[in-house]
Amino acid sequence: MEAAAVVGRGGGSSSTLRILVATDCHLGYLEKDELRRPDSFDTFEEIFSLAEQHKVDFVLLGGNLFHENNPSRSTLVKTIEILRRCCLGDRPVQFQVVSDQATSLQNLFGRVNHEDPNINISLPVFTIHGDHDDPTGVDNMSAIDVLASAGFVNYFGKVDLGSSDVDEISLHPILIKKAATSVALYGLGNVRDTRLREMFQTPGAIKWINHESPEDMPLSNWFNIMILHQNRRTASPDNGITEYLLPHSLDLVIWGHEHESIADPQEVPGIGFHITQPGSTITTSLTSAEATQKHVLLLEIKGMKYRPTKIPLKTVRPFEYAEVVLEEQEDVDPNDERTVHAHLDKVVENLIEKNNRKTGSGSEPKLPLVRIKVDYSGFSTINPHRFGQKYVGKVANPQDVIVFSRSAKRRQNTQVNTDGSEQIYPTDLDQCTVEDLVAESNVKTQILQVNDLQTALHVFVKKDDNMAFHSCLQKNTEDAKKKLTDGSSEFKSGDKEKLALELDRCMQASAKQETGSTPSSQNLPASMALSAFEELKCSSDHVDQDTHNDSDELIEISSEDEERHQLPRPVKRTALAMVDGPASSSSSSCSRRKTDLTSYRRIPPPKEEEDGRAKKRRSPHVAGRYGAVRRNR
């Protein structure tokens, strides 16, 4: 694998596969802001304009297509309009998908959209989901599923982990062939960083399905691409994954989620594959990482060689960023707030002038975004909203032009006063997780998993999903039922001793829970418990059979059953009392005959129960303000 020139730009080599890569489009970002609401859609249209200009075979999106997990109808309509206008047409698709599409694509049709005879797709789009538009709810659906069902995108890399007990991910590649070029495209949508890191470190938790080589083509001739959407931070061991966790058989890794544009592929030392980070196509967080030029990446692959070309985006709103440390400024007086205003005004004016020089004359440029990060150590803060009012009409974000912070070197929890005492500053509030609350209360959860509760809470708060906890409960309940069903198959029909011991143990535990003490004479041996279980099963089967034959006929109550019902025993132990009679009681209960209504008799309730009902009978009088008042019937 080499990053080298493969063909002349715009050339006509039939073996060259051209892919336009974009990540983090965040469609619908700030849709309630009248000035900035069209920014994400303007850039999205530019991406498809570049795809048509460079005659790419398909567009590959690296997650966070939508900014909101539940995008508005306006956002969905605008997205579908752009996809319909740019992706439908009569231009033939020049590549083939030779893998089992049903295993890698998340749609009911089981095939890519350009192979659907009912849709004319000229520019296919392949996409994974990110942390903003990930699937949620009982059915594990996202807004991308809507686009995939309509036939506008090919959605892959979707995994349904369900509850925390699901500890396996299978990654099936999409095998793409164009003449002599063969590409295996792996995709993985966003998974919570902590859980994905644990699965990467667990042997066998993530299965990379090897592609079967069609015809007689060796596996070494496949160009392996992996696209994922995760945090890429090596400072924290729990927040994000590293490239060293990925398999060495990959050739190129496309990393989404990070907004900083590092489009030029970089080789990972000691592994061999390259990593490219195209970055976001819109500025969402006003930080230094997003102050650089935004790009999309054009990949041209021929055989085992590829050439990356980063293309700058021209419709992105300009962004100017600066940092100011007030202590280092000579014209700022800590005791005079007007000097702080004057100095920050100069900085803002310089940034606006700098942006005007970049854009130059021509078409009307967009108002720039301006952000100044101010280190106010030793100074008092000013009102950011009042400060930004003077820049309305000059910048696109007058409400948050400045943000105050304190340097890590100057931020101390204690400070010595002039009288020698120490003044304690409040520290940052610790974030309390569900695991901490459960650990403190010492709650032993058996069905609901703590990790799933934390995920449901995150989805409920961050993604405004009112069904998050309902989905968590249903998935965990279904997993528990599946475990019980799988566990019941372990008891074979001939293993009566094991079944009897298990029944005896359950009955003893139930008796302890009801009485609060250890049962003595009420415990039954294992053989009697098994007999009771068989008798109940036989009776249940016989009743079901009779009900199936004639639902209107009644069953005669035998004399033994009648005497048993008259005994002052709890109803729960009636089934256990059946084994106290002779051995023929079980057979007689299984061979009850049907009779007429004359032998059917309703068993009267005990006398104590009748007295209790009489006491609970409502009085015809109710207490009023001036005495008893008769209740109206």
Image: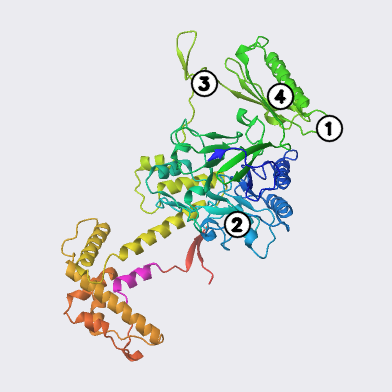
- Element type at marker 1? loop
At 84% across and 32% down in the image, what residue appears? 362
- In the picture of the structure, the residue carrying the numbered disc 2 is 96
Where does label 1 land, which residue?
A: 362
- Of the two numbered discs 3 and 1 on the same chain, state the one appearing first in sequence: 1
Residue that badge 4 annotates: 387
**Amino acid identity at mark 4:** Phe
Q: Does the magenta stretch include residue 5?
A: no
Residue 550 on image: x %, y %: 40, 87
Residue 606 magenta-drawn? yes
Mark 2 to mark 4: distance in Å?
58 Å
**Is residue 568 among what the camera can see?**
no
Q: What residue type is labelled 3?
A: Ala
Look at the image and give the residue range highlighted in magenta.
604-616
**Can the viewer see residue 308 in this picture?**
yes
**Most common secondary structure along the magenta stretch:** helix
Identify which amino acid the numbered label 1 is placed on.
Gly
Q: Where is residue 306 in the image (x, y as percent from the top left)?
A: 59, 41
Residue at x 65%, y 30% (from the top left corner): 292
**In terms of secondary structure, where does tag 2 sit?**
strand
| Pointer 4 local density, CA inside 10 Å: few below 14, some 14–19, many at least 20 | some
Between 406 and 582, the residue placed more toward the observer is 406
Whole-angstrom CA distance, mark 1 to mark 2, is 44 Å
* Label 1 vs label 2, nearer the camera: 2
How far is disc 1 from disc 4 in space, using C-alphas? 31 Å
